[in-house]
């Protein structure tokens, strides 16, 4: 299907999609202009298929005289003072609701032409002078130039090459060649050869401006030369009933071309590997800022403390219990309350900023500047907000079971037994001391083993066995503490990576996905 045959409705739908994606993201004037164009298209479609043709030109170009010649009456009065045309005038042919259309165009002065089948459905406007000394006249020209269906630029032999009209109006309408006519008026002021040279020069100017498809007519509103040809061109546009559609199609394509400057480059989605690397990079930086190493160390020391207390010599357990649990001091376990973790320092904050900037650069690679700007705004999460989310994630992470394993309980029971053995030996020795004091030590026999008193063996054996059992258990306790710390670290890092995904990476990816949707919609509107 050719560009011209692509339905206008499809183009408008694509442009609407592009505007919806860009809304709130792209801080560029083209988005507002596209929104205004969609509003114009909706309003124009509701006003029927009449053909609105506007005569535009400079002061003294004779467009009002040409307008009157086309209208068959002096509707717009030519004058000698500058400016001559202050407000737009309208002549309508037929009975097809032109008043509603003129109300929308805000054209107050109206003239109804008699029945003329070839032109029924035509609404002809005489615009104010585009070079008027009065600003409101120039603004009115710009407004109506953007609303009408067909533009007829009326030039005169003296100012047909004026840069003001070519640079400001004609050259920018290169994409609207199908709804544009150029009339060299006052041709009666030139002889035959001069007229041909003038027309050839004008044709060359238009060709260089990309307007090769624009018809150029020679006319004279004063003598009527070329008026019939111009009426024939207008009658052809009216009969086709496509002027409004063609104008909107050209507008949409032009608007899409303007938006396309923000849809260039590579906006392919991030690969799984790339996304995983970014998640790991952000997770490492955020983990350091969230105090994960501190929590991991506290888990290891807390587990070590509990293990040593379970397997150590019972009398020393009470001494260890007087020391606070390093994990309890952090107040973890309740994600609704703040922990006692120290806030991130300058090094950690710099690490987070560097990781975020690196991720933003990777995600924004290949995107147009407007989307990179939006990416920067999207990931501007305040330090306090990010710190709160990380703190809640750490506080709510399950650090693993703190139950004392069965083997430690068994060792602890054995330690109590050995302590009781040592205590029994000590009490026996104490009893012997008391008996010796009363010189009754010969009354009670003292058992010996290999020549050593049994009470002494009980005390020494209980103490030495308890110490040896504690020393043997210590590496196993440390191994369990490290394993629990590593498991806690994995859970903490997973929680931090979830924050990185939700607060940073997902919004970044959404920008890139929206950029791809925007690019696709713009291409559909433009093709």
Image (cartoon, rainbow, N blue to C red):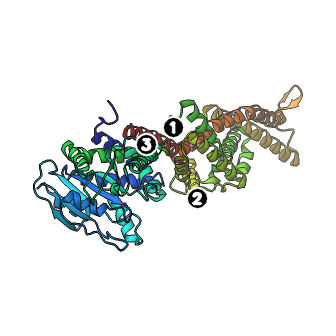
Q: Secondary structure at mark 3?
A: helix
Residue sitting farthest toward the bottom:
81
Of callouts 3 and 1, the N-terminal one: 1
Q: Which mark is residue 249?
A: none
Mark 2 vs mark 3, foreground winner is 3
Disc 2 versus disc 1: distance between alpha carbons? 32 Å
Q: Position of residue 412 (x, y in %)?
A: 67, 37
Residue at image x 32%, y 53%? 152
Residue sitting farthest toward the top:
450
Q: Secondary structure at mark 1?
A: loop
Residue at image x 70%, y 55%? 345
Asked whether residue 402 appears in the rendered view, the answer is no
Q: Position of residue 408 (x, y in %)?
A: 65, 34
Residue at image x 81%, y 34%? 464
Q: Which mark is residue 518?
A: 3
The reply, left or right, for residue 258 in relation to residue 153 is right
Disc 2 versus disc 3: distance between alpha carbons? 33 Å
Q: Position of residue 113 (x, y in %)?
A: 14, 59
Of callouts 2 and 1, the N-terminal one: 1
Give the class, few, some or many, for how many residues have Cα within 10 Å of label 2's Cα (few <14, many ≥20): few
- Residue receiving disc 1: 267
In front: 124, or 333? 124
Disc 3 and disc 1 in contact, CB within 8 angstroms: no
- Residue receiving disc 2: 384
The reply, left or right, for residue 253 in relation to residue 298 is left
Give the class, few, some or many, for how many residues have Cα within 10 Å of label 1's Cα (few <14, many ≥20): many
Q: Quadrant of the N terminus?
A: top left
Q: Quadrant of residue 406?
A: top right
């Amino acid at each position: 299907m050719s560009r011209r045959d692509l339905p206008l409705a499809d183009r408008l739908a694509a442009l609407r999609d592009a505007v919806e994606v860009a809304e709130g993201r792209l801080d560029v004037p083209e988005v507002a202009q596209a929104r205004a164009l969609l509003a114009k298209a909706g309003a124009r479609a509701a006003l029927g298929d009449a053909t609105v043709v506007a005569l535009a030109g400079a002061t003294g170009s004779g467009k009002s005289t040409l307008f009157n010649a086309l209208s068959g009456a002096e509707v717009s009065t030519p004058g000698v003072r500058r400016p001559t045309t202050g407000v737009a005038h309208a002549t309508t042919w037929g009975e097809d609701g032109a008043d509603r259309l003129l109300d929308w165009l805000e054209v107050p002065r109206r003239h109804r032409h008699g029945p003329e089948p070839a032109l029924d459905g035509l609404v002809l406007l005489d615009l104010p002078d585009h070079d008027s000394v009065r600003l409101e006249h120039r603004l009115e020209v710009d407004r109506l130039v953007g609303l009408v269906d067909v533009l007829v630029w009326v030039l005169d032999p003296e100012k047909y090459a004026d840069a003001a009209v070519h640079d400001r109006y004609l050259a920018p309408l290169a994409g609207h060649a199908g709804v544009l006519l150029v009339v060299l008026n006052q041709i009666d002021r030139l002889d035959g050869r001069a007229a041909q040279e003038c027309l050839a020069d004008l044709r060359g100017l238009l060709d260089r401006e990309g307007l090769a498809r624009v018809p150029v007519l020679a006319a004279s509103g004063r003598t009527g030369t070329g008026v019939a040809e111009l009426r024939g061109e207008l009658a052809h546009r009216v009969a086709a009933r496509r002027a409004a559609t063609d104008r909107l199609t050209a507008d949409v394509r032009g608007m899409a071309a303007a938006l396309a400057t923000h849809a260039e480059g590579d906006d392919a989605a991030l690969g799984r590997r790339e996304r995983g690397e970014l998640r790991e990079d952000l997770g490492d930086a955020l983990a350091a800022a969230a105090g994960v190493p501190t929590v991991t160390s506290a888990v290891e020391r807390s587990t070590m403390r509990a293990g040593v207390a379970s397997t150590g010599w019972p009398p020393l357990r009470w001494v260890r219990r007087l020391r606070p649990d390093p994990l309890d001091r952090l107040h973890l376990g309740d994600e609704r309350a703040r922990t006692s973790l120290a806030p991130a320092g300058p090094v950690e904050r710099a690490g987070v900023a560097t990781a975020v900037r690196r991720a933003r650069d990777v995600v924004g690679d290949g995107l147009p500047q407007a989307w990179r700007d939006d990416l920067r705004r999207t990931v501007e999460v305040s330090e306090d907000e990010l710190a709160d989310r990380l703190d809640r994630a750490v506080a709510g992470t399950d650090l693993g079971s703190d139950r004392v394993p069965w083997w430690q309980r068994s060792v602890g029971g054995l330690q109590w037994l050995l302590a009781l053995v040592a205590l029994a030996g000590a009490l026996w020795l104490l009893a012997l001391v008391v008996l010796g004091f009363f010189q009754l030590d010969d009354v009670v026999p003292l058992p010996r083993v290999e020549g050593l008193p049994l009470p002494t063996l009980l005390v020494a054996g209980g103490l030495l066995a308890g110490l040896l059992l504690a020393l043997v258990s210590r590496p196993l306790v440390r191994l369990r503490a490290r394993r629990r710390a590593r498991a806690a670290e994995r859970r903490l890092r997973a929680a931090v990576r979830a924050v990185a995904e939700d607060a940073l990476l997902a919004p970044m990816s959404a920008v890139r996905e929206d950029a791809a949707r925007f690019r696709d919609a713009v291409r559909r509107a433009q093709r």
